[in-house]
Amino acid sequence: MTSIGIFAFIGSLGGAEVTIIIFAILLLFGAKRIPELARGMGRGIREFKDATNEIKSELDKSIQDKDEKK
């Protein structure tokens, strides 16, 4: 199965299904844990972006150094 096939059902979710999913998440994690989970996800995304920006800047710098040597 491809990832497109696995996640194809997301486009067909209606309002009732989304409400049930949110309610289930509230029951599983509780109202106090959800902000903690969101903060953790935000930190992870920020660290990932910082790492990709750092790699991109290193690649750009190496390309500029290579062009200057020519």
Image (cartoon, grey):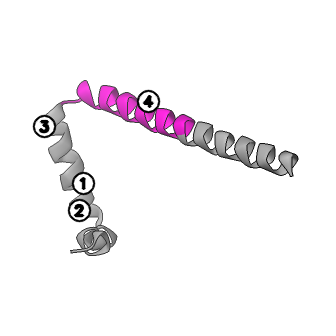
Name the secondary structure under disc 2. Answer: helix
Seen at 37% across and 35% down, the residue is: 41
Residue type at mark 2? Ala
Q: How far apart are marks 4 and 3 (CA)?
A: 22 Å
Residue pointed to by mark 1: 19
Up/down of 26 relative to 5, above or below: above
Name the secondary structure under disc 3. Answer: helix
User: Residue 43's image quarter?
Assistant: top left
Pointer 1 with pointer 2, Cβ within 8 A? yes
Residue type at mark 3? Leu
Residue type at mark 4? Arg
Labels 1, 3: front one: 3
Percent coordinates x, y for residue 61 in the rendering: 74, 41
Considering every residue shown, the one lying at the far front of the view is 70
Seen at 24% across and 54% down, the residue is: 19
Nearer to me, 39 or 15: 39
Labels 2, 4: front one: 4
**Residue 32 is covered by the magenta coloring:** yes
User: Residue 13's image quarter?
Assistant: bottom left
Sequence-first disc among 2 and 4: 2
Residue pointed to by mark 3: 28
Q: In this view, does 36 lie to the left or right of 65?
A: left
Nearer to me, 19 or 11: 11
Residue pointed to by mark 2: 16
